[in-house]
Image (cartoon, rainbow, N blue to C red):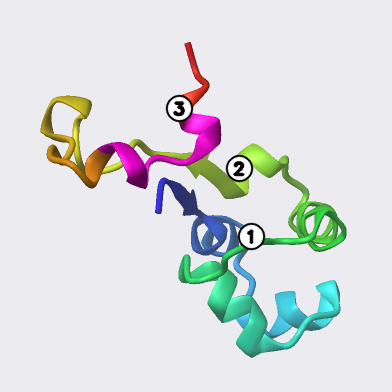
Amino acid sequence: MPIAVDIDVMLARRKMSVGELAERVGITPANLAVLKNGRAKAVRFTTLAALCEVLDCQPGDLLRWEPDELDETEAPEGPDAAGSASPAAANRT
């Protein structure tokens, strides 16, 4: 996924455990682990705001964009390739 999560970096900087952060934010350690390990599909703004408040940081300190591993020059070709793009991606100019 092109969004990388750096909660572990901020935890180390703040010398805080996952359990302590989860308790202070108000989410379960399991849900925090899903987010921390990059397996989450979404994050609520209220959760992101609480993380930022507890860790005294900005959202950009916790989340960053990384390009996909495939370059555009390496994109799949063939009859199915055109149909696999999302409508939003097809409308970009």
* Left or right position of 68 against 45: left
Q: Kindly identify which numbered label has been placed on residue 61.
A: 2
Dot 3: what SS?
A: helix
Estimate the spatial distance between the alpha carbons at disc 1 and disc 2, rounded to whole Å: 13 Å
Name the mark nearer the viewer: 1 or 3.
3
Q: Which residues are magenta?
A: 82-89
Q: Is residue 85 magenta?
A: yes
Residue type at the position of mark 3: Ala
> What is the secondary structure assignment of the residue under circle 1?
helix
The reply to whether residue 79 is visible in this rendering is: yes
Say how many tags the image has.
3
Task: Residue 41: give x, y in percent of width and height.
Answer: 57, 65
Query: Any mark on residue 90, and which?
Result: 3
Mark 1 and mark 3: span between their CA atoms?
A: 42 Å
CA distance for labels 2 and 3: 31 Å
Q: Where is residue 68 shown, x and y percent of the image?
A: 30, 42
- Crowding at mark 3 (Cα within 10 Å: few <14, some 14-19, many 20+): few
Residue at the disc numbered 1: 14
